[in-house]
Image (spheres, helix red, strand yellow):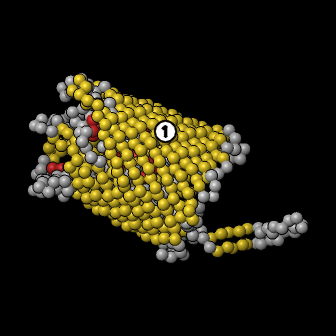
Amino acid sequence: MSLKAQDTTLVRHTRLDSMQYIKDVVIYGTKPYREVIPAQILSGKRLEGLNSHSIADAIRYFAGVQLKDYGGVGGIKTVDMRSMGTNHMGVFYDGIQLGNAQNGQIDLGRYSLDNIEEISLYNGQKSDIFQSARDYGSAGTVYIRTRHPRFTDGKRDNLNVTMRTGSFGLANPSLRWEHKFNRHVSLAFNTEYTYATGQYHFRYRKRFSDGVIAWDTTAVRHNGDIGALRIETSVFGVFTDGRWQAKAYYYDSRRGIPGAIVNNVWHNAQRQWDRNFFVQGTFQKRVNDRYELMVNGKYAHDYMRYLNPDTTLMYINNRFYQDEAYVSTAHKYTLLTDWDVNLGVDYQWNYLNSTLPNFSYPTRHTALTVLATSYTWRRIKAQASLLYTHVTDLYTSRSAGVVLGHHTRHMDRWTPAIFMSYQPWQEHDLNFRAYYKRIFRMPTFNDLYYTDIGNASLRPEYATQYNVGVVYQIQNEEGFLSNLRVSADAYYNEVTDKIVAVPKGTGQYRWMMMNIGLVKIKGVDATARAAVRLPLELNADVNLSYTYQRAQDYTNPADDQDGGTYRGQIAYVPWHSGSVTAHMGWRAADLNYSFIYVGERYHNSANIRANHEQPWYTHDISASYRFNLGKLKLRVTAEVNNLFNQSYDVIQNYPMPGRNYKLILKFDL
């Protein structure tokens, strides 16, 4: 690192003043790398300019991610990382995991970007070892950080009002209020309401195997309406060598489930109601130069009602109630200057109740303990962890309403992980990295205990990951190119004892969950980012991501004949996918463009022509302008999504919207 001083001026001083003053100091140097495996991050203007309504819409721009989107504003959206399955991905909201013991899937469509400051994605696990034991328990993690209050000098309150309107009958007002009680404590309150009819035109075309078009029509998507209210309050505190945060979250929605377009059925009547509530808190303090403490706690209650009034199929009116309690402590100790250790201990309790007949009413107690260490020697950084998991399930077996018995099931597992990175030259920001991790996911309550389908003998589903990669970065204080970052990773994953549904007996509609799956995944993720300075006060940046994946089903070698599933690309995983985002700014104006491409894939592991899905792509564009009216700051944004009106399905028979529009007004005071 070099030091450059300009216009150095000595100031006359007295005997009591031993300091000499220099007028201007500029320091140049390479930012030291801290993480063994750097994250993919969306924040700031890039996050704001993605034309995304929910977190799920934003995450699809990350390399190695597949999004399952069932269409429309209210459609359920889940994310899969490197084809290991949605349940292998942990989602953390302000440092504490979002849970769903019933089916293991987090609907990211419930979380708006209005209150989000940063989204980061880690393959394997987060590189900072000072984490709870739960942070080590997933094959990959997404960290969502909400906005923290920031106040200019003299201000004690910030107010932001946003209004979105556009296609599908969208009305989406939101309000954020921030208040500073004193230097140490501040509050943030955010509420949002989303209403949409969910109606949009789509094109439905069917071809026979010989290529002849069976039908080609345009219809309107129905029963995709949504009304959702989200309320969120956070209190932030800082003190000497520490901080704390408390949060309360409430979400209430009712939505239609438009269903699949099959057998010439265009209307579905299914409905779903959700109420989600949680309170959580975190406390962190540096006790001394060597020891740091973190404590997390959470309680959550979720309600879900599903109604299918169509008696020609099967009348269903089920209600589910989930409760979760969680507490964790993490203790980091610095043994030497470059050697840290962390001990984390977590406890989690889950309970599920339902109106289903012969329900098992399962309760799960989970205890996790992790011992992790991080060591840096010159330009080599290494991290290792060993996670111990103990699970106890309590459930009741019933038949025809008669209790057959009360059961207890125990499970103990040890899972390791090793991460390393190496920077060959100090003067160049070039890093090589590699990691190995073995982890598992417990069967969900639905997998184990769902009436007449669950299998209480299921084993955990394991994921084994190997990764090697490289990242290179250039940062310039002056000149045309201000920042360049490129990265590439090659990986091999195996998912064993995969939990799949198989036919039970001779009944066509009777299924059971079984451990018979094996998936082998080979892939490459590549990303690039460049930011440039242009004349006339223009600035621009572009971000590219590309993923190649070969994810094959190795479950049954006997199923290797034509039309079989053995070694077939698993459902909905494309061989090639990628995205481009670009931004250009000039004074108070911004222009954003984004492009997503998903290549050909199959909707079944039987890779035959009848199961083939065509590639799809979308272009989105937005323009915004900021201006002031006295003390009021305004921002106007106009968006056009799916600019070229591409007809496509992310999930077969769930048509996505064509070209649509959005107008956004933001007021800051």
Foreground: 240 or 98?
240
> Looking at the picture, how far across and down is residue 308, in whole percent?
27, 27
Q: Quadrant of residue 408?
A: top left
> Looking at the picture, how far across and down is residue 99, in whole percent?
41, 41
- Point 50% across, 76% down: residue: 425
Residue 161 falls left or right of residue 135: right
Residue 663 falls left or right of residue 287: left
Foreground: 518 or 260?
518
Picture layout, residue 30 above or below residue 449: below
Mark 1: amino acid: Lys
> Looking at the picture, how far across and down is residue 494, in whole percent?
28, 58
> Looking at the picture, how far across and down is residue 343, in whole percent?
49, 53
Q: Quadrant of residue 596?
A: bottom left
Identify residue for label 1.
Answer: 298
Q: Going by the picture, which residue comes out furthest to the right?
A: 14
- Point 36% across, 34% down: residue: 363
- Point 33% across, 35% down: residue: 394
Q: Is disc 1 surrounded by few (<14), some (14 to 19) or many (20+) residues within 10 Å?
A: many
